[in-house]
Image (tube, rainbow, N blue to C red):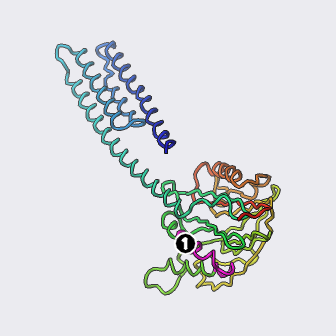
């Protein structure tokens, strides 16, 4: 909280310092206008002072600068026309300054109100993300874990990508997935699947039974009232994994999702599923039998789970992010350090803004299981 308050104070102090610019402009224009020949009138240039103030100031700052500009124009008129007090030309300029200043103050009031509403929306969305999609624990049994979520919609901060983990008596189960679509609607669908996973992951006897339950849950939860079937209008790609504490072989059911990658000594290996299944939510259409694949994951390896927002991220030329190519040679065995480097590299590739949500989980095993 103190850091947040300090961050809010900095723009305020910077805005106050920048007020010197329009004030200096008013002084400079007034002085030059007073010493210039009678046929030269620089008073209209005073309008530039209140016009630039909204760039860094609020309603009070704009009102102050506008008032100073009006006073300066009045002084110029009185000095230039002492006999007639103020000419009609100066009166017109003063009226124009008043109207411009009042309009800018009203604009700043509405802008600040909109900014407060947007800040509130961001706060609520961030709170929702912490509830629906909290960062994974740093330690899960014998695993060290780090997670990263990058939302395409900055105001939403959460979208259709999802991940979760659950401990069982013999290991750790994880899910990473991507809901069809994006935005708040996709976030709602993701929350439904995550709820089903957290409820069932602890007690399902086998991985294929868990996936079958999740597929049915997607159909049940996303059907409209009165429907009797699931027609695949909404589906969720996902990888569901079971990482045992006492075995180096990871079990996986791949449901139309990009395959995991094992990074070993800087060399990435893509773990393609031998028996891929359709995305969750299409079970009633495809009637799949869920086969469990497996692959080797040893201490010292780094296991990477991600969504297609990573591999489909494009640079300015339309080139996709080449994940395996970019991470080749990366020797970070610490999940947090890896994701810090990965986030920087991905955002550099896309020029700082993603067109789709992206999520990644980095997992490292330890030789000693943890309780």
Q: Is residue 14 left or right of residue 314?
A: left
Q: Residue at x 76, y 56 (%)?
A: 325
Does the magenta run of residues contain 193?
yes
Q: Quadrant of residue 312?
A: bottom right
- Residue 107 horizontal/vertical position (percent): 33, 42
**Nearest the camera: 340 or 199?**
199
Q: Is residue 99 left or right of residue 327?
A: left
Q: Quadrant of the C terminus?
A: bottom right
- Residue 297 horizontal/vertical position (percent): 79, 66
**Element under disc 1:** helix
- Residue 219 horizontal/vertical position (percent): 54, 80
Q: Residue at x 26, y 35 (%)?
A: 99
Res 316 visible? no
What range of the chain is rendered magenta?
Answer: 190-211
Q: Is residue 29 left or right of residue 73?
A: right
Q: Main secondary structure of the magenta part?
A: helix
Q: Residue at x 59, y 49 (%)?
A: 352
Count the labels in the image.
1
Res 216 visible? yes
- Residue 343 horizontal/vertical position (percent): 65, 52
Residue topped by disc 1: 195
**Nearest the camera: 231 or 2?**
2
């Amino acid at each position: 909280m103190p850091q947040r308050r300090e961050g809010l104070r900095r723009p305020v102090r910077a805005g106050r310092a920048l007020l010197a610019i329009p004030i200096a402009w008013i002084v400079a224009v007034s002085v030059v206008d007073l010493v210039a020949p009678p046929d030269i009138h620089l008073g209209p240039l005073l309008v530039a002072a209140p016009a630039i103030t909204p760039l860094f100031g609020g309603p009070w700052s704009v009102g102050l600068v506008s008032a100073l500009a009006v006073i300066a124009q009045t002084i110029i008129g009185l000095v230039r026309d002492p006999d007639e007090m103020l000419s009609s030309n100066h009166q017109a300029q003063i009226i124009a300054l008043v109207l411009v200043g009042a309009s800018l103050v009203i604009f700043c009031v509405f802008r600040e109100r909109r900014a407060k509403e947007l800040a509130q929306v961001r706060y609520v969305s961030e709170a929702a993300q912490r509830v629906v999609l909290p960062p994974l624990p740093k330690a899960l049994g014998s695993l060290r874990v780090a997670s990263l979520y990058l939302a395409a919609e900055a105001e939403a901060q959460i979208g259709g990508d999802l991940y979760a983990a659950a401990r069982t008596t013999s290991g750790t189960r994880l899910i990473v997935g991507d809901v069809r679509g994006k935005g708040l609607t996709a976030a709602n669908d993701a929350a439904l699947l995550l709820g089903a996973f957290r409820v069932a992951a602890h007690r399902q006897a086998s991985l294929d039974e868990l996936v079958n339950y999740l597929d049915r849950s997607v159909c049940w939860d996303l059907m409209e009232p009165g429907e009797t079937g699931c027609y695949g209008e909404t589906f969720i790609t996902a990888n569901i994994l079971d990482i045992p504490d006492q075995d180096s072989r990871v079990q996986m059911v791949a449901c139309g999702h990009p395959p995991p990658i094992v990074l070993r000594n800087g060399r990435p290996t893509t773990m393609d599923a031998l028996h891929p299944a359709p995305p969750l939510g299409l079970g009633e259409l495809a009637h799949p039998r869920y086969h469990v694949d497996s692959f080797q994951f040893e201490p010292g390896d780094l296991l990477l789970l991600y969504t297609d927002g990573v591999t489909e991220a494009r640079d300015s030329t339309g080139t996709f992010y080449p994940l395996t190519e970019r991470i080749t040679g990366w020797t970070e065995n610490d999940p947090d350090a890896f994701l810090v480097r990965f986030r920087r590299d991905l955002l550099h590739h896309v020029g700082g803004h993603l067109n789709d949500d992206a999520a990644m989980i980095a997992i490292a095993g330890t030789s000693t299981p943890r309780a």
